[in-house]
Amino acid sequence: MYKIMIVEDDEAICEELKNLLESNNYEVVILKNFADACNEILLNSPHLILLDINIPYINGEILLQDLRKKSDIPVIMVTSINHEKDEALSILYGADDYITKPYNPYILLLRIKAILKRTTNNYLEITYKELKFDLRKYTLKKGNIEIILTKNEMLIFSYLISHQNKIVTRDELMTILWDNALYINENALTVNISRLRGKLKEIGYDNVIITRKGLGYILT
């Protein structure tokens, strides 16, 4: 079942879209944390995103730009702004399609189906330096070398990538593991960080996860 993420702050519209999509056999997740929208999208690994331009904290087009630096997840811009400039910018920034509100539900479903049909398996792949990080297969690949991550390691690494060159606290990482029902105790984070470092070292990326004592970790 395909997973579609709705990035929209109007609760009524979210509910309308959710009902439409679920009735057509799509799994639906609605973005709640707009302050950290790009990371939330990557952690949920949707097959497609319905993205409104006017959202809290960050303009939808800017969010799209940020997302395109990390992933090729298909995006349909859904907005009430019927302006050629916004449509052109959305496509320029990497949107796969554009539809204005009020939209025809049948047309929206056709566009979703068309995009999912033509999309390759690369939309859940993130690039880090020369590594290809596949969020669906939990793999790191460099050339012909492929390393398999555990789900814990995948969650930690994807969060560090989305906050590259910024300090990430242990509490942030433990919250991610807790929210995904994978957190056991504080020592589990240390163990997973150590294992992740070991796997990165195997493919030539030693010392890229730096410990900042009393603060957390930083991915360089």
Image: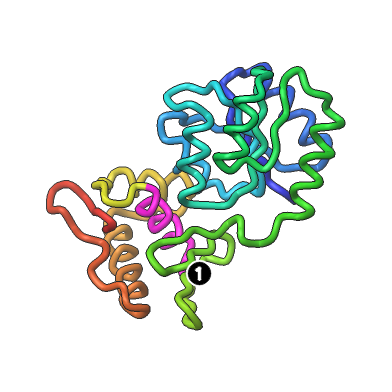
Residue at horizontal 35%, vertical 80%?
Answer: 202
Extreme-left residue of the structure: 213
Residue 177: x percent and y percent?
Answer: 41, 50
Residue at horizontal 49%, vertical 58%?
Answer: 126
Q: Is residue 161 magenta?
A: yes
- Secondary structure under the numbered disc 1 in the rendered image: strand
The magenta segment is 149-162
Visible residue check, residue 89 = yes
Residue 147 appears left or right of 169: right
Extreme-bottom residue of the structure: 144
Residue 197 appears left or right of 11: left
Give the amino acid at mark 1.
Thr
Q: Quadrant of residue 128?
A: bottom left
Residue 92: x percent and y percent?
Answer: 58, 39
Residue 113 appears left or right of 15: right
Q: Which residue is mark 1?
A: 139
Residue 188: x percent and y percent?
Answer: 32, 60
Visible residue check, residue 29 = no
Image vertical order of residue 54 relative to residue 127, above or below = above
Residue 208 appears left or right of 53: left
Residue at horizontal 70%, vertical 38%?
Answer: 97
Q: Quadrant of residue 196?
A: bottom left
Q: Nearer the viewer, residue 147 or 61?
A: 61
Image vertical order of residue 53 relative to residue 220, above or below = above
Q: Nearer the viewer, residue 95 or 43?
A: 95
- Work out which quarter of the rendered image holds the C terminus and state it: bottom left
Q: Is residue 6 magenta?
A: no
Look at the magenta stretch and give its main secondary structure: helix
Residue 190: x percent and y percent?
Answer: 27, 61
